[in-house]
Image (spheres, rainbow, N blue to C red):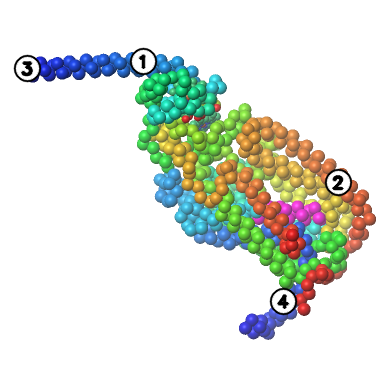
Amino acid sequence: MKSWAAWGRILFVLLAWAGVGWSQTAAKSAEAVALFSRHCAVCHGEAGQGESAVIRMAGPSLQAVHNPGLVMLAMETGPSHMPRFETILTVPQMRMIARFVTRRLAVIPLTGESLGRGGNLYRVNCASCHGAVTQGGTLGFAGLNAPALRRKPMALVAGAIRWGPGPMPRFSAAELPARDVASIAEYVRYLRRPSHPGGAALHWNGPVPEGAVAWAMALSLMVFAIWLEKGGRG
Amino acid sequence: MIEFLARWFDARLGAAKFTRKVMNHVFPDHWSFMLGEIALYSFVVLVMTGVFLAVFYQGSSVPVIYHGAYRPLRGVRMSAAYHSVLHLSFSIPAGLLFRQMHHWAADIFIAAIFAHLARIYFTAAYRKPRELNWLIGLTMLLLALANGFFGYSLCDDVLSGAGLRVGYAILLSVPVVGPWLAFLVFGGTSPNPATLPRMFVWHIFFIPAALAFLILAHLGIIWRQMHTNYPGAGGGEKLIVGSRFWPVYTMKSLALFFGVFAGIAALGGWVQIDPVWVYGPYNPIGIVPGAQPDWYLGWVEGAMRLFPGVNGHVGRWLIPELFFPGFLFPALVFAFLYCYPFLEQWLCFDFRGHNVLRRPWEMPWATALGCAGLAFVLVLEIAGGDDVIAVAMGSSVIVVRRVLRVLAIVAPLITGWIIHRWCEAMRRKHAHLREALAGADAGYSEAEIAPQPQPR
């Protein structure tokens, strides 16, 4: 009988503790939601889905950001148009937001990727605008250029695929399932440091700079011929 | 030993007399006479590297799965042709070096032909009796362009495929015979598994053989007719002045060969060209920014980009827009060039032979016309890369293209006008220098230039 009571008391304490913890977490998460929607949602959208680039300051989709470190870093350093939050938020608040972003908003998984498949999908779906090696390119109308992706974190690449910022098309889960999104992001990451033999890459702009180099060499050979005609002197 | 061998051959072939004759053949000294040689030696490099590539290349569209050294393409389905190019680039020792040298050599080969053609044009070396070599030279340029296009297509990557699509579309656009023409070149509709093997045979056999034959004819004719010489170089219509074939000329030429080889090898080793592995295997819907033809077809691409989108109509029939810039324009350019020597003969009523070259300013309208043509081609060439330029300048393709459309009309006119003025001024300045245009149908002999070291 005694042991029953003891167990009951322990259970009660545990339940109470869990309840308090739960309500605290709930409070915390409510605070995190509030913080995010106050400080971040203007640019990143309430669900972290990314705001349309119609607003100049729009931020990218955060729905594939699984690494809290990346969020902390962004808040502390303020990349590109994003403000720095060091002085606006306390460290615990930033931690809360980071946890909120990575646990609640990150709905695009980044697993099951395959480099070969990612390469194929990238070349079919993205290379026409962003270039074969993510160097960026023109859309050919209205002066719109697709940005280079070399500096974009993998998570933002994955987010952009679902989000479709500005004139970029939006790829639904029916068009590119989660695994394909992860594969494309992996290939884009690979292209930051690709195995790329054969010498200087001429910015991967294809035959235009190649033709210029060929002509430079042809002209050098003509200069060489002039030198030969002078009897190899001066 | 050498003497013994020499005697042996001499006794059987009469080689000594012949060799002496050959060694004493005189070539005039001028750097602009070596442009053709740069082309010749690039061709030699092309053949040497091409033989190596042909050993490993497979001209087949059979689909295979890649399992080679390049990680991002492992497990990817591709044609056997693209597979063999990847294998060559990543797994064959020096394979990539040879491939890059081959491609650079092709670009330089045609650049040198182009410069050589310009030299011939501006110095009027095409005049009687050398019209034949002008025609042969133009034919070689055409063959070189075709072979460059085929070579570009053989890799079967996304750029190759894009090029083939454009080529196919241009052929289809030709009125009446278009579909047959396209069928002849592609072996059916495009893409088509018959295309690659067909192009491979043309690329490594028929066209190089034709080129080699024409080069021999070209050189043989130069030898027979002897080289032209510049006015004021000591020679004249009846006398050629320069260095003997052996030793001076041979050594110069040999040095140039080594220079060309070294230049191409340096580029092949140090500068990437056509990195097919980033473009990926051919896929009908794949395309990348910066996808252009090689420079020697860039002017046709530029013409297609600048040409306004208007279709032609003949009765009920439609002539697609593409036909005008893509087929008619290059055809007219070459037709004009082929006819030019005869056109000039007829216009100037000058049917005499000429061994002395014409200085460019001596015929202002011809020089102005040539320079205007060069300006036009240059604008088109730039237009062929207008997307790359727009991104590099942070501008819009539309704006760049509009500017280039205006330039394509204005630049040739201004260039022609300026050059014409310059020629007239030079003509006035050098009026006293102009030599009488003597006929030279009979007799053209040779003399070694005075201060050259005499062989004993």
Q: Position of residue B325 (x, y in %)?
A: 69, 41
Instruction: Give the label on residue B19, or none.
Output: 4
- Density class for disc 2 (Cα within 10 Å; few <14, some 14-19, many ≥20) is some
Is B117 colored magenta in this rendering? yes
Residue drawn at (85%, 51%) of the image: B361
Q: Amino acid at mark 1?
A: Ala
The image shows residue B16 at horizontal and vertical percentages of: 71, 80
Q: Is B307 left or right of B416, judged from the image as shown?
A: left
Q: Are marks 2 and 1 in contact (CB under 8 Å)?
A: no
Label 2 residue SS: helix
User: Are the residues flagged by discs 2 and 3 in contact, CB closer than 8 Å?
Assistant: no
Q: Nearer the viewer, residue B156 or A196?
A: A196
Q: Earlier in the sequence, mark 2 or mark 4?
A: 4
From the image, tell me which residue sits under label 1.
A30
Q: Report which residue position mark 3 lands on.
A: A2
Q: Secondary structure at mark 3?
A: helix
Q: Chain of mark 3?
A: A
Q: Which mark is residue B422?
A: 2
Mark 2 on the same chain as mark 1: no
Residue B299 occupies which quadrant of the picture? Answer: top right
